[in-house]
Amino acid sequence: MITGASSGIGAAAARLFVAEGACVVLMARREGLLEELVGEIREGGGSAVGVVGDVTRPGDVERVVSRGVEVFGGLDAAFNNAGWGVRGADLHETEDVLYDRIMDVNVRGVWNCLRHQVPLMLSQGTGGTIVNTSSTAGLFATGALAPYVAAKHAVLGLTKAAAAEYGERGIRVNALVVGSTRTGLTERGPGGGSGRPVAARAIQHRMADPLEVAQAAAWLCSDRSSFVTGGAVPVDGGCSAV
């Protein structure tokens, strides 16, 4: 299961996971882009279903999980990638409606996904692996507006708590600490619009391609990372190292 799957990191992950042999259930709000991606995957011989939905709505998340079980028989791995942010004002000038939206998508969205993915994985008895998308804003203030920084810190907290609670029952939970990536969000989102101010802090002095982030998610969703849980895995070009 991949959320935020219609573009950017989510779409790159969908293509990569399928190329590595996975069947994917894809969730996104933008129906047209989602249908295009599912069609592309199926034309290439892969297995994918798309479900339009909003991660802030528990019923939508439940519907996506149920659809995955209906079509593919279960859930082995999840990439909770959906996120949202915009360039905003200083903390004291940020309106409550913006704070609420950022926290809803980035924190409640992950919360809703965990609340429906974990019970299914427990009931299957075979464990599973979950990857949540955080950000360098989850480690330090990056020039992004305060609610986004708070939200991405919260994603790391949820990840660690879930990993601790379910580790002995076979469920691994990790987070990606993502640096500036060439997506639609970085063109209009926190961290300086194009992402260049954040990218300048990275050792590699560039932005990531979405596929580079997807590769890290694929590793965490696979048995190749079987002894990794509760981690905040940096995919940031070294930004968090300096």
Image (tube, rainbow, N blue to C red):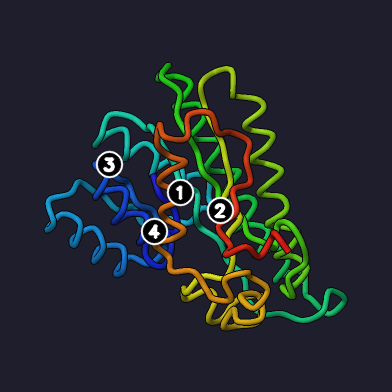
- Mark 2 vs mark 4: give the one in front: 2
Residue 133: numbered disc:
2
Q: CA distance from mark 4 to mark 3?
A: 15 Å
148 on left or right of 23 = right
Q: CA distance from mark 2 to mark 1?
A: 9 Å
> The residue under label 4 is which amino acid type?
Ala
N-terminal label among 2 and 1: 2
Q: CA distance from mark 1 to mark 4?
A: 13 Å
Q: CA distance from mark 2 to mark 3?
A: 20 Å
N-terminal label among 4 and 3: 4
Residue farthest to the right, as pictured: 92
Q: CA distance from mark 3 to mark 1?
A: 13 Å
Q: Residue at x 47, y 76 (%)?
A: 184
- Assign a secondary structure to mark 2: strand
Contact, CB < 8 Å: mark 4 with mark 3? Answer: no
172 on left or right of 203 = left
- Mark 2 vs mark 1: give the one in front: 1
Q: Which residue is mark 1?
A: 217
Q: Which residue is mark 3?
A: 22
